[in-house]
Image (tube, rainbow, N blue to C red):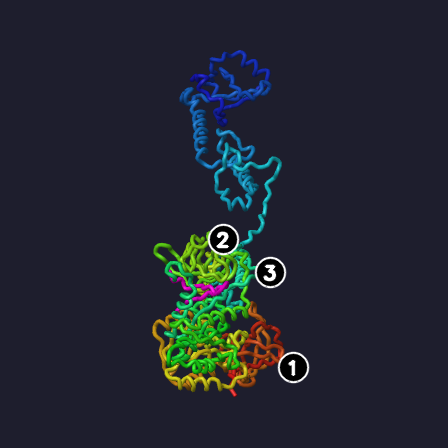
Amino acid sequence: EAEVEPDQVSPAVPEEPSKEKVIKLVEPKEAETEIEEKKPAELPVESKDAGAEPEKAEPAKKVRAKKRPRIKREKPAKIIKLPSVAPSVKPVSETELAAPAEEGLKRKRHQKVARRDEEPQPVARGREKKRDMPPAQDVEGDRRFLKKKITFRKKEVLDRQDLYDGKALRGRKGRRGRKGKVAIKGEKPILTTPKAIKRRIKIDDPIMISDLAKRMGIKAGEVIRQLMSLGVMVSLNQAIDFDTAVVVASEFDYEIERAAFEEDSIIHVEEDSPDQLRARPPVVTIMGHVDHGKTSLLDAIRETKVIEGEAGGITQHIGAYYVTVGDRQIVFLDTPGHEAFTSMRARGAEVTDLVVLVVAADDGAMPQTIEAINHAKAAGVPILAAINKIDKPEADPDRVKRELAEQGLAPEDWGGDTVFVNVSAKEKTGLEELLEMILLQADVLELKANPDKLATGRVVEARLDVGRGSVATVLVQGGTLHTGDAVVCGLHHGKIRAMADDRGKRLDSAGPSMPVEIQGLSGVPMAGDEFIAVADEKMAKQISLHRAQKQRVRELAKTSTLTLEKYYEQMQDGVVKDLNLIIRADVQGSIEALSEALQNIPSSEVKVNIVHSATGSMAESDIMLAAVSNAIVVGFNVRPNPKVRDLANEHNVDIRFYDVIYNIINDIKKAIVGLMEPTYKEHFIGRAEVREVFSITKVGNVAGCYVTEGKIERGRPVRLIRDSVVIYDGKMKSLRRFKDDAKEVQSGYECGIGIENYNDVKVNDVIECYQVEEVAPVLE
């Protein structure tokens, strides 16, 4: 018999009973008696004979089983009968017994360290379990754990705003099991729906298509396609107004707001009361033909009126001067002919109150004289005629009066309303009478202005000085301009650093009709630009930037001023009442023949108006006059120089060149005919009878027809007739023969016809196909 020490038996792991092992349950009293008789150190060993009859034999030695703490003594003890040969068991040391515990502690420490770098996950209640459980129980525990974890994730709710703010991507903070976002105690997570985000943008008026698409984050092609669906044909670099932009943006779920900055809201133009108005000096422009003495006359007037003792008399050229006549003043604008006058008018500048037309008594009315008359008439400015060089022997004032009377300037002594004054700039005669007549004409015009407000006016000329920067000569038309005022001048702004008059004298202020030279602008403005004084320099900068943006839009969206092709569209809108022409020909006879032929074109709806006609090559003044009067320049046997052509392209003036008068007459007739309402003539093509109606998904009703007369052509307008009454008149959507698209179907064949935007087709209806032809009107 082999004895086994008690420490070699592991009472914690029970073994399955076999044939050699017998477990006998005894009564509690007997078990307690046997256990008391044995010593703890002895190990029961069965005898050899006991193996033959295990059920009858009693064990020689009995082992007291090691009880678990949870087993009570009152329960029956277990008696294990060992086999005859004991298995070899390796002794287990205390170190090996303690290894699993240490391994568990290491695993816990490793998990704690790993959790510092990993995202902490929320732990559901009841997750804690023993790690040394049997494998089967571990699987079941994991299943319960996963189930609870998934349930927890379903309960976790994130607000949509948290997703936008990126909170869902952030790791949770705090210790294990604590949520990153502290919830209010007693409040359950609720799915919240944020308010609808309104997409709102601010734009200027007008705005380019490309800029609008960029603001909305939409492709420009989509915006153009939407505008075309609304019936507006535009291009990428074309501008649209604010109302159109609102309609287009609403199709893309955008709200449009006008930019907060509005120039009209900042610059308040208030009407002056009669009590605030004061008389102001007249502004006079001297015009006339070359070498007729315009500059000499102005110098003579200034020399006689400049106060002696002032340095040099004329100290500088600023483009505008004022002279004193008694207790009154007169302002003269020294323009290089009428070209600058027209340039200023082309930009909307109305700075002149009176025009003094200088005509040489020995030459009479010359081409530029007539041109100056046309410019003054177009501007609506009164004209005062000054017959210069009256001191010459060959002077003939009466001939000059006759020539000017032919141009519509009848003298007063002939019953007209034009004042004529004979002067001599060389002899300085007639100057006083001329000045008196100017003041008399100013009294008739009743020129007044309010000096007690912020200054407004126009730019006469501007230049860039090397030492002083931008220098501009401005004419104050209203209010009073002070040194230090913040001004907006066209597309530029600035603060007036210095101000001087035409004699170079420094000024602190300038009232109405006062020409002054100012410094301090951010750039060089153009002649004719408006200037206005504002509250501060910041406001002036905002206004100038706003104007620059609008100017950029206008330049990109610039189209030709007027062409024969667009003339009909303007007439339909009621914009144009007559057709303005400027004629340039090689000889005077061609001008007379052409003018007579154009005036004799029969038309009761439009009038052909010849604004100006002259001989010789085209000049820049023709282009400027055409831009101002919205006229078409017609050249007969003449050609422009490159400079004139570039100017025409800059101002988008339509120029036509001809060699035959007949071609000119035909083109003008075509333009007039285009003004008349066209007539329409209808042509019958074919007729079909509806035999069957088919309903097709996503298409609608299709009429199965039999062509009874003529032919049915695809794309033509059709008319649906029921009981001899026209039910619908529209466009054909589809035409098929069997399942194939057909271009046309002849009489005697069947076909399927689909009508656009109409499905109420019935059997025995008649579909007529026709064509509409536009017939152009013919002059009488």
Residue labelled with disc 2: 539
Residue labelled with disc 3: 275
Disc 2, SS: helix
Within the image, what quadrant is residue 102 found in?
top left
User: Quick check: is 640 in the magenta stretch?
Assistant: no
Q: Would residue 578 be found to the left or right of residue 721 on screen?
A: left
Residue 597 in picture, x, y percent from top left: 46, 86
Within the image, what quadrant is residue 764 found in?
bottom right
Residue 163 in picture, x, y percent from top left: 51, 45
| Residue mark closest to the camera, 2 vs 3 | 3
Q: Earlier in the sequence, mark 1 or mark 3?
A: 3
Please name the amino acid that badge 2 sits on.
Met
Q: Look at the image and give the residue range highlighted in magenta.
A: 314-336
Q: CA distance from mark 2 to mark 1?
A: 73 Å
Q: Can I make out residue 257 in this image?
A: no
Q: Residue furthest bottom?
A: 780
Please name the amino acid that badge 1 sits on.
Asp
Disc 3, SS: helix
Q: Earlier in the sequence, mark 2 or mark 3?
A: 3
